[in-house]
Image: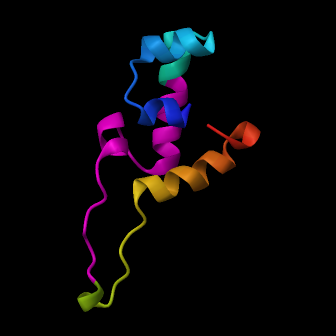
Amino acid sequence: MLAELQRSRANAQIASDLHISVETVRTHARKIYRKLGVSSRRELLAPPSNAGSADEGTERPDTVVGRSAQAAAELPGGHA
């Protein structure tokens, strides 16, 4: 499911391909967003910010893409 969301496909297209309802796609998407700490598909697809430079002694925050793989592995079935 995560890969489908990252491809910017419409919920109806995802639902049709996976043989589930559009509402089920929305539900899974919300749960994925929550797990990744984002609130929308736009935020999921946004490039990582450059907040926290090395000069400040802070590490760069995880990118959504990096969190995506980790969170996908934690989802039921081990994939999204």
Residue depicted at 35% across the width and 75% down the height: 60
Instruction: Name the residue furthest right.
Output: 77
Residue 50 appears left or right of 3: left
Q: Note whether 49 is above or below 42 in the view shown.
A: below
Relative to 45, is 29 above or below?
above
Color style of the picture: rainbow
Looking at the image, which residue is at 53% across and 36% down? 2
Q: How far across and how far down the image is residue 67, in percent?
A: 50, 56
Q: Is residue 25 left or right of residue 52?
A: right
Residue 34 is inside the magenta segment: yes
Q: Work out whether 32 lies above or below 25.
A: below
Image quarter for residue 54? bottom left
Which stretch did the figure color magenta? 27-53
**Residue at 55% of width from left, 28% of height from top?**
28
Q: Quadrant of the N terminus?
A: top right
| Residue at 34 percent of width and 43 percent of height | 45
Tell me where residue 59 appears, x and y as whole percent. Answer: 38, 80
**Number of callouts in the render?**
0
Instruction: Name the quarter where the C terminus is drawn.
Output: top right
